Image (tube, rainbow, N blue to C red):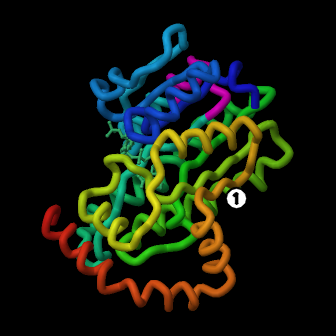
Amino acid sequence: MRLSEARVVLTGASGGLGSALARQLAEAGASLLLTGRDAGRLATVALPAGCEVRRVAADLTSEEGIAALAQAARDFGADVLINNAGTGGFGLFENQAPKTVAHILATDLAAPLRLTHALLPVLRDRPAAAVVNIGSAFGSIPFAGFAAYSAAKAGLRAFSQALRRELADSPVRVIHVAPRAIDTALDPPAARALNAALSNACDRPEVVAAHVVDALRRGVAERHIGFPERLFARLNGLAPELVDRGLRGKLGVIKQHATAQHTESP
Ligand SMILES: NC(=O)c1ccc[n+]([C@@H]2O[C@H](COP(=O)([O-])OP(=O)(O)OC[C@H]3O[C@@H](n4cnc5c(N)ncnc54)[C@H](OP(=O)(O)O)[C@@H]3O)[C@@H](O)[C@H]2O)c1
């Protein structure tokens, strides 16, 4: 897709990955419709001079938020939707309140599906269009301590693949990008400490944003970031019991940090 002519709706634009993405897309010449819940945070996203930008505050877990953003996207003439907004979900599943689990599924799975559904009629009318879903390595390597988050991201991966197959005869490309850990505010201190304890690689948001922009430009269907993560994703597909065994050895340290998370934020 030619980014200099793209009209991009970007959710989660005020977050760590979203603001890096907004900058890189604007530098490539794209016009932007940025969204997040907090209008004040959205206003602080720094962009190069001369870029066409609109900002809409909307909570994507509500019907009203989806409807308001869909209307703004129609007025804007969107041809790209990037479903990037998300919430983290670190903690032992049995310690998470039902409302926490519901919030993770609503934000990380239901919201991108509902927004995509609302925007498809607009995107189908364009000569070339794309939906980009920001998943996670945990969508292919479901991880202890992230059960609901892994379920949401695995659902988003399956949705991306099914929709891509359904829209194969349309102008709409469906792209799924699965980052590993990113250095943003999404993860609470206990999850960051776990990453450090397990020596999990953590990418800068600018690096991940460059992958997303590249995948969009080339129309790449699937982009999994990080070599060991790509390998483990394949292994988990072929022989999940091997990954079960590997993670069993890390369960003590995962539980220790997940318990700290539960104490910090019951
Ligand atoms: N950080 C990581 O380690 C990591 C790893 C793999 C994948 N990812 C994925 O990357 C994406 C971006 O995450 P990030 O790390 O940049 O997180 P972040 O810095 O916490 O940003 C999250 C963004 O989503 C918005 N948001 C959250 N809930 C929302 C809602 N209900 N309605 C509308 N907007 C909402 C936030 O803005 P408001 O709070 O103002 O609404 C913010 O702009 C997410 O999909 C995440 O799952 C992150």
Q: Which residue is mark 1?
A: 161
Q: Position of residue 218 (x, y in %)?
A: 76, 39
**Residue at coordinates 49% horizontally, 16% vertically from top-left?**
48
Q: Is residue 223 magenta?
A: no
For the point 32% across and 47% down, the residue is: 185
User: Secondary structure beneath disc 1?
Assistant: helix
Q: Is residue 52 above or below residue 177?
A: above
- The structure residue drawn at horizontal position 24% and vertical position 79%, both measured from the top left corner, is 256
**Left or right: 77 in relation to 126:** left
Task: Please tell me in which quadrant of the rendered image residue 15 appears.
Answer: top left
Q: Tell whether 18 sits left or right of 265.
A: right
Residue 106 sits in quarter: bottom left
What secondary structure predominates along the stretch shown in magenta?
helix
Question: Which amino acid is tagged 1?
Answer: Gln
180 up-or-down from 125: above or below:
below
Q: Position of residue 123 (x, y in %)?
A: 69, 32
Q: Is residue 75 magenta?
A: yes
The residue at the point 66 percent across, 54 percent down is: 223
The number of callouts visible is: 1
- Residue 8 in the image: above or below residue 151: above
**What segment is highlighted magenta in the picture?**
70-80
Q: Extreme top residue here?
A: 50
Q: Is mark 1 within 8 Å of ligand 1?
A: no
